[in-house]
Amino acid sequence: MAVPNELKYSKEHEWVKVEGNVATIGITEYAQSELGDIVFVELPETDDEINEGDTFGSVESVKTVSELYAPISGKVVEVNEELEDSPEFVNESPYEKAWMVKVEISDESQIEALLTAEKYSKMIGE
């Protein structure tokens, strides 16, 4: 199972890619495999504020609905609109096509608190 080294991870199975003061957030390959075929993705609006630990959307699969938990706090600067019409991207390409939101980072220390790829791999038993 892919766990890219350059990303950070939350215990709730979100990944975070930091570029300058913007963090791109999505769900991990492990999470999408546990959920099964994704049929719907609900995301926040651009300019919404999200807070670490709070829900910022959900993904619906044929099996269940799973909340998305913000791994960091910040202002949403971009939303992946393609997921509205193509939720299957979450299964097909969780780390590239299926990023969910881009957030302007409000607290750098929250990035440091996230898991490394190695720690996340251990957590999921890889």
Image (cartoon, rainbow, N blue to C red):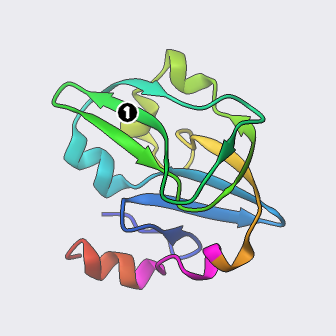
Viewer-side residue, 23 vs 72: 72
Q: In this view, does 99 lie above or below 41?
A: below
Callout 1: helix, strand or loop? strand
Residue 123's x, y, as percent?
Answer: 27, 77
Q: In which quarter of the image is the N terminus?
A: bottom left
User: How many numbered markers are drawn?
Assistant: 1
Choose top left, top right, bottom left or bottom right for residue 74.
bottom right
Residue 118's x, y, as percent?
Answer: 40, 84
Q: Quadrant of the C terminus?
A: bottom left
Residue 109's x, y, as percent?
Answer: 68, 80
Q: Is residue 85 above or below residue 41?
A: above
Q: Magenta span has 113?
A: yes
Viewer-side residue, 33 vs 60: 60
Instruction: State the residue at coordinates (62%, 74%).
Output: 110
Q: In this view, does 29 lie above or below 89?
A: below
> Which residue matches tag 1?
59
Determine the residue located farthest toward the right in the rendered image. Answer: 20
Determine the residue located farthest toward the left in the rendered image. Answer: 63
Choose top left, top right, bottom left or bottom right for residue 89.
top left
Q: In this view, does 79 lie to the left or right of 89?
A: right
Instruction: State the residue at coordinates (73%, 70%).
Output: 107
Q: Magenta span has 72?
A: no
Range covered by the magenta-colored residues: 110-118
Instruction: State the residue at coordinates (44%, 27%).
Output: 41
Q: In this view, does 81 lie to the left or right of 14?
A: right
Residue 51's x, y, as percent?
Answer: 60, 54
Q: In this view, does 99 lie above or below 114?
A: above
